[in-house]
Each structure stands twice: as structure tokens, then as C-alpha cells.
Image: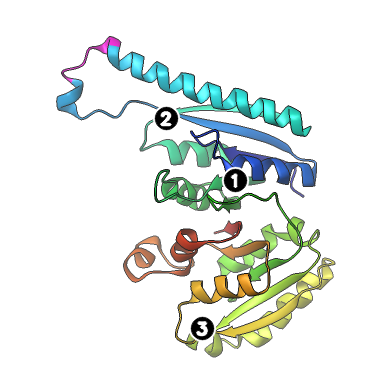
């Protein structure tokens, strides 16, 4: 079960879909929610730092702390309004260490919630990857345009027989048990056909049935489009409300060079995505 959750609070209080979504997940599961605010140390090039007095540098740092604490206070107010058990987490870090510190904190929670990178503003790519690789826990990535609370109307699980996909489906069991409908999606390409995914998909369907989760197995050809586009197209056509998938089945370097489903989904996602590695 999901008993405790940690959410990264965005600097822009007026646009923090991850916080609102995390509150709705906490309500759905009766879970405790920790709001984490990152306060960054000033990043100054050496030649600039040498020209600034320690007093001014400390002032910049103090202002960052003040803004982070304001986010925590607003989070407290929202949690009380929603009747959610909550706590504050202030994380003071450099830009370089923030992802590591957040992921270390996330190890002691059932789930992390982070907003998708907004290409016009916030870049959370390092934070998302840090949690995926460093926490040992699943992460829910929320689109920066998300307006709706969590919905269990239709959960879509991506399945390719990989270790990451198996971990993701297992981590998603609390969500699948609440789902009104659930599909196991196999995107057929040369690799999945070679590995007889039809049989593996049936086996995973039986496994989930033993947990009381009935799934329909769907197979779609990737055709002329990439795997990520096939997944998102099916999600849109089936009105899926939550996507479950393994994150980074290949090395990050390989995905960076050759492209990969994880990176493509994170940049183009249209619904919340529950990921595990």
C-alpha cells in the first residue's frame, strides 16, 4: 500500500501541479505527505564570487531560504484544507547535489511526486533521473499542464517483459487495485516479436489476476512511429488516466545518444506517469 509520499514543491506556487496531484494521491490512499522545498546555495562563477562580499552572498542564500520556507507554509495550508496528514522537509543543497539529496530522502517513502520539466521554465530532468536511479522507489511524474487530481478510471501499463517493466507493474499494484479498468499494452516491434511477448503478456495478466487485478491485453504495432509515440497515441485513444512504465530500460548514455522511450515520454507526456527502474 501507499502509506507515505514525498513531493517536490515548485518555486511558482501558482503553478505547482505536482503538489495538487500529490495531495489527491494522499487523499485516495489515506497516506501521509511530505512537502519538500529545495533551497539552493548561490551559484556564482569564481570571478564573480571574488567581487562579492560574504555579506551579499549570505543575503542571496537567505532570500532563497525565505522563499523555500514560504513554499512549505503554503503547502501546510493546502494540506490542512484537504485534510491530509503532512510534514515539511527543507532541503538545502547546491544545484549539483539537489537530485542526490532528494533521492536519498525519497528512499524512506513509498512514492515520490515530481513535476515534468517545463521547457519554458523549470528543468526537473536531473531530479527525476536522480529519484529513478537513486531512491529504489517509484516516482510519479506529473505533466506541467496537469489540472485534474488522480483518477483511477483507466490505468495503462506498458509491458515489454523487461526487468524495469516488471518492477513498475509491481510498484503500481496499489494503483491497479483501485483502477476501474486496466490495460497491459505491448508495442510490437522486431524485438518484442522475437521474445514472444504474447505469451509473456498472458503470463503477466495471470499474475495480476492473482492479485485481484483484471487486465485486458492490448497489442499495437509501432509501425512508422517510435515506441513512445505509439504509447501516447494509445493512451489518448483509450482515455487512460495514468500510465505505468519502466524507466530507462537501457543506459542513460545510450538513450541520450540513440533516443529512448523514457526520454521521449518525459518530454511529450500528456498524462501522469508512474515510473520505476
Dominant secondary structure of the residues highlighted in magenta in the image: loop
Between the residue at mark 1 and the residue at mark 2, the CA separation in whole angstroms equals 19 Å
Label 3: which residue? 222
What's the residue at 55%, 53% (across, down)? 143
Mark 3 or 2, closer to the camera:
3
Is 200 left or right of 250, judged from the image as shown? right
Q: Quadrant of residue 210?
A: bottom right
Between the residue at mark 3 and the residue at mark 2, the CA separation in whole angstroms equals 42 Å
Where residue 74 sits in the image (x, y, percent)? 61, 26
**Tag of residue 113:** 1
- Which of pointers 1 and 3 lies earlier in the amino acid sequence? 1
Quadrant of the rendering where the C terminus is positioned:
bottom right
Residue 107 in sight from this viewpoint? no
Where residue 75 sits in the image (x, y, percent)? 63, 29
Where residue 160 sits in the image (x, y, percent)? 58, 76
Q: Give the residues drawn in magenta, as a range.
A: 50-55
- Which of pointers 3 and 2 lies earlier in the amino acid sequence? 2
Mark 3: which secondary structure?
Answer: loop
Is 56 left or right of 136, judged from the image as shown? left
Amino acid at each position: 500500500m501507499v502509506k507515505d509520499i514525498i513531493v517536490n514543491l515548485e518555486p511558482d506556487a501558482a503553478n505547482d501541479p505536482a503538489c495538487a496531484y500529490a495531495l489527491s494521491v494522499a487523499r485516495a490512499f489515506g497516506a501521509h505527505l511530505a512537502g519538500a522545498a529545495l533551497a539552493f546555495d548561490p551559484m556564482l562563477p569564481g570571478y564573480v564570487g571574488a567581487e562579492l562580499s560574504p555579506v551579499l552572498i549570505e543575503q542571496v542564500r537567505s532570500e532563497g531560504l525565505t522563499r523555500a520556507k514560504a513554499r512549505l507554509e503554503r503547502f501546510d495550508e493546502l494540506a490542512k484544507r484537504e485534510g491530509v496528514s503532512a510534514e515539511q522537509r527543507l532541503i538545502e543543497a547546491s544545484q549539483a547535489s539537489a537530485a542526490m539529496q532528494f533521492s536519498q530522502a525519497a528512499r524512506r517513502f513509498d512514492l515520490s511526486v515530481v513535476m515534468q520539466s517545463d521547457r519554458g521554465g523549470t528543468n526537473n530532468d536531473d531530479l527525476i533521473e536522480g529519484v529513478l536511479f537513486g531512491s529504489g522507489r517509484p516516482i510519479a511524474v506529473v505533466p506541467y499542464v496537469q489540472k485534474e487530481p488522480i483518477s483511477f478510471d483507466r490505468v495503462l501499463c506498458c509491458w515489454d517483459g523487461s526487468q524495469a517493466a516488471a518492477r513498475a507493474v509491481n510498484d503500481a499494484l496499489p494503483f491497479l487495485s483501485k483502477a476501474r479498468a486496466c490495460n497491459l499494452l505491448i508495442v510490437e516491434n522486431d524485438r518484442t516479436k522475437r521474445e514472444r511477448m504474447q505469451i509473456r503478456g498472458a503470463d503477466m495478466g495471470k499474475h495480476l489476476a492473482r492479485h485481484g487485478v483484471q487486465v485486458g491485453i492490448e497489442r499495437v504495432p509501432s509501425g512508422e512511429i517510435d515506441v513512445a509515440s505509439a504509447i501516447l497515441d494509445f493512451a489518448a485513444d483509450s482515455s487512460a488516466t495514468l500510465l505505468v512504465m519502466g524507466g530507462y530500460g537501457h543506459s542513460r548514455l545510450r538513450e541520450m545518444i540513440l533516443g529512448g522511450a523514457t526520454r521521449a515520454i518525459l518530454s511529450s507526456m500528456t498524462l501522469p506517469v508512474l515510473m520505476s527502474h
